[in-house]
Amino acid sequence: MPAIEIENVGVRYGAFVAVSDVTVLVPAGKMIALLGPNGSGKTTILKVLSGLIKPSEGSVRVLEGKISEARGKIAYVPQREEVYWDYPLTVWDLVAMGRVRAVGPFRWVDRKDPIVRMAVEVVGMAELSDRRISDLSGGQQQRAFLARAIAQGGEIYLLDEPIAGLDAAAEAKLFIVLDFLRTSGKTIVMSTHDISTTLELFDYVLLLRNKPIAFGSPKSVLTSTNLAKAYGTERVAMHLEDVKGVAGWA
Amino acid sequence: MIEILQGPLQYEFMRLALVTAIVVGVTCSVLSSFIVLKGWSLLGDAISHSVLPGIAVALTFGFPFFWGALFTAVASSALIGLVESKSRVRNDTAIGIVFTGAFALGLVIISKTRPAVDIFHVLFGNVLGVTFQDLLVTAISGSVILVAIGLGLKEIVAYTFDPTFSRVIGLPIRLIHYSLMVLLSLAIVAALQTAGIILVISLLVTPGATAQLFAKTIERTILVSLVVGIASVTVGLYLSYYLAVSSGGAIALVATVVFFAAFLCKGLKKRVGR
Ligand SMILES: Nc1ncnc2c1ncn2[C@@H]1O[C@H](COP(=O)(O)OP(=O)(O)OP(=O)(O)O)[C@@H](O)[C@H]1O
Ligand SMILES: [Mg+2]
């Protein structure tokens, strides 16, 4: 079953073409990386998939229907800097926010809501559930966000640069959760700047520079020719040799 | 002590003033938590200044100032939103343009029509002059605000913390946004007689800001904010009675003192904790 069908999608901001000619089919239960230089359209594509912006051209279908029909099933995890972390919330409160829609108006999310508890446990934060969100590390904040998406009952997870600023250990913890989600049939789309071994964890990579440069398995996409086309510099392509060595592709 | 507390209450106007001030304190404190967290302090200040033309027109034509003030408050918040979204002007600039314009308009109208009302009271409040009718209007406005926040609390928290997320999961964020604007306008108008156009923002910002220094959850933020708000209006009102000073001024001053006291306490606690 295709989870995401993007056909000839283009997005213009006024006269400026942010992305164009994107055609991508993603089956459910896969993990896709959006890769490309700054301003290449990664966030734009995530926003289209989440329904935050309408494409100027082309069509998008999510879970074999319109985005508006999949509202509760699409979980958007914004960049960490987008929210005010000093907001007085505990980890539990943040995760419970994922249940706001399901619980419906004029009612509270139960203090012992089993789905919230499950989500907190899945990301390994049961011990921290009473901690104020301002006192979390970057990696913990990212996992708390992910727990909120899980509590929401998301089928499609859209993550904007979730590993930016995380150290290797925090990154690994995040990928454990993502891998668990993938195994349970969820589809994950995330943008990243990290041209390194993390990419081998993905099923697909979409390399962008305001239009697709390549789409396919990490190995087929990450060639020096493609990277040079995307980044327009030899240095990124040279770095690739190290990546391949570590990933065992060389 | 009891003497001091009871003394002023033998007068009808003081009893009315105290009840009105407490109603205002409760209403503003609850809303205050969200105003501070959403970063709407400047917006609140702007809306309160913008009610002057509404009051001026109401006084000139002799209809209740409540409606004049409420109309201009809502209109100015809508206008700020419009300027901000339809141009490249930043939020704080849009606020600066609209509120000075509205305030100036009010001033011009008042200077022309010269209504028989003390402009000093309009600007800085005169809670000692409230009538039972005024108290009723304030209480109704306050109840509307509290009920609305109570019913929509989890949605308001979600929206003020993460509007993008709220939109993606399909919450009616426009409705929430504009409702908050209307509630803010209503709170400002309800508090006008207590604190006046210039000082009302003190009640809408300081209690929430004080609470934010300590509270870990939103429920506790609201609670601490309530305590600060009620304490400020009560102590302020007594001070204004005994020292014969402006009630709005005394209330705002007490709120500010409470904030800095809390601020210092927190600083000391951190030192000791280390
Ligand atoms: N609201 C907007 N109005 C006008 N142009 C925009 C807007 N949002 C994005 N753009 C432009 O669209 C292009 C794609 O932006 P996008 O945010 O999708 O890039 P990105 O790949 O996420 O970049 P980064 O790696 O820096 O996050 C950029 O050139 C950007 O300047
Ligand atoms: Mg981006």
Image (cartoon, helix red, strand yellow):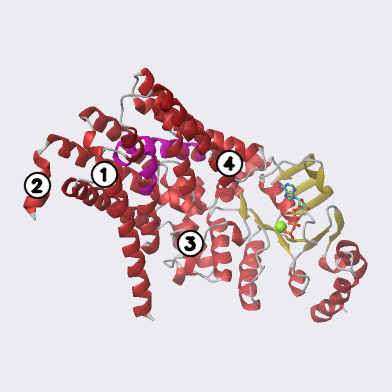
The Cα–Cα distance between marks 1 and 3, rounded to whole angstroms, is 36 Å
Please tell me how crowded label 1 is: few (under 14), some (14-19), or many (20+) other residues with Cα within 10 Å: many
Residue corresponding to mark 4: B94
Same chain, marks 2 and 3? no
Q: In this view, does A61 lie to the left or right of A231?
A: left
Same chain, marks 2 and 1? yes
Q: Is residue B75 magenta?
A: no
**Chain where mark 2 sits:** B
Mark 2 and ligand 1: say if the CB distance to the nearest ligand atom is below 8 Å. no
**Quadrant (top left, top right, bottom left, bottom right) of the N terminus of chain B:** bottom left
Q: In this view, does B224 lie to the left or right of A45?
A: left
Residue corresponding to mark 3: A86
User: What's the mark number on residue B193?
Assistant: none
User: In the structure shown, which secondary structural element does the residue marked by tag 1 occupy?
Assistant: loop
User: Where is residue B15 shown, x and y percent of the image?
Assistant: 15, 39
Quick check: B156 above or below A207?
above
The Cα–Cα distance between marks 2 and 3, rounded to whole angstroms, is 42 Å
Quick check: B66 above or below A208?
above
Q: In this view, does A131 lie to the left or right of B21?
A: right
**Chain where mark 4 sits:** B
The Cα–Cα distance between marks 1 and 4, rounded to whole angstroms, is 32 Å
**Chain where mark 3 sits:** A
Quarter of the image for residue B88 reads: top right
Give the mark toward the camera: 2 or 3: 2
Say which label, 2 or 1, has the lower sequence index.
2
Three-letter code, disc 4: Ala
Residue corresponding to mark 1: B246
Three-letter code, disc 3: Asp
**Chain where mark 1 sits:** B
User: Where is residue A26 shown, x and y percent of the image?
Assistant: 76, 54
